[in-house]
Amino acid sequence: MTDRPGHPGAGRKPGRAPALTAIGLAAVALAAASVSACSVGPAAAGGSSAPPVASSAPPSAGPLPASTPDIPGLPGESGHGTPPASPAASPAAPPLAGKVIGIDPGHNGGNFTDPGAIAHLVWNGTGWEACDTTGTTTDGGYTEAQFTINVARYLRADLRRDGARVVTTRTGNDGVGPCVDRRAQMINQAHADVAVDIHGDGGPASGRGFTILEPVADGPDANVIAASQRFGADVRQAMLAGTVMPVSDYNGVDGIMSRDDLAGLNLTTVPKVLIECGNMRNATDAGLLVTARFQQQAAVALAAAIVEYLG
């Protein structure tokens, strides 16, 4: 090294350099040995390591930002140096990452205001069907349209949390329509991986329970019948596991029924079912259907069925 003004080696006499270098080396060696003997941290000395950090999150709360609380005594906090960092674990991908889900909340709150618009006929794949209807109501006047949009909103939030892109046929409850054929088209054009039509039934007052309506091969839906049936089985299981609503005792068999007269099912090109979540004309079912608790439970059950089907 070239000597510089102010450098520790500047102005040394050439004849003394070897002796000073030898003495300096010896001193450095002794100091290094002393530091080595005094700097053994807890792990190297056989002491106990810091306890593991446990973390938990409520079920279905979605991915949370990773964080590590400050814990006294962790290596590196006592001035003994920082240990090599461990590779960070990659966060698990959300279960529906990259998936597209279709949701069709039946009817619309404004349908009551424009009977002419919803009465005109559209082709449903096998015959002519009304553009839409008002849907049913409970004896207390709670509308099916309000029920279905509530469940759809809860479901959309759950699916987005799980990483899905969600396509809904309506997001408000004060419009008219869209017509049932247009609803099917919206979901088809989004190339949804699976879709669900959400309804509440207007059955006989003595009847209880949910019914899952599945398509019949009679047109554009011919290629998704088996897939829709698999999805329907997942929805049935999830509803039984996640809600107190029983399977229908007046419709279908064990809560499953095939339908060939509904545009939403006849015109679908993606796996889809329609669920009547309960009978709004039955006092017991209605007492459940109007509550936020049941609506949330139904949404969670549908999300679980979608995850199961696409898993």
Image (tube, helix red, strand yellow):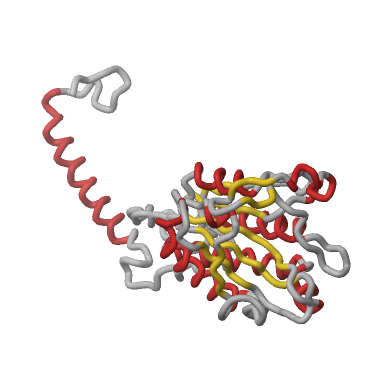
Up-down: is 255 above or below 262?
A: below
Q: Residue at x 59, y 73 (%)?
A: 239
Up-down: is 24 above or below 135?
A: above
Residue 46 seen in the figure: yes
The answer to which of 285 and 87 lies nearer the viewer is: 285
Q: Which quadrant does the C terminus fall into?
A: bottom left
Q: Which quadrant does the N terminus fall into?
A: top left
Residue with the most extreme right position: 140
The answer to which of 76 and 262 lies nearer the viewer is: 262
Up-down: is 169 above or below 50?
A: above
Quarter of the rendering containing residue 240: bottom right
Q: Residue at x 74, y 54 (%)?
A: 133
The number of numbered discs placed on residues in the rendered structure image is 0
Q: Residue at x 75, y 68 (%)?
A: 202
Residue with the most extreme front position: 127
Quarter of the rendering containing residue 217: bottom left
Left or right of residue 169, residue 96 in this image: left
Q: Position of residue 223 (x, y in %)?
A: 40, 56
Left or right of residue 265, residue 139 in this image: right
Q: Position of residue 24 (x, y in %)?
A: 21, 40
Q: Position of residue 81 (x, y in %)?
A: 37, 53
The answer to which of 4 and 77 lies nearer the viewer is: 77
Left or right of residue 209, residue 238 in this image: left
Q: Residue at x 67, y 62 (%)?
A: 199
Left or right of residue 173, residue 261 in this image: left
Residue 94 seen in the figure: no
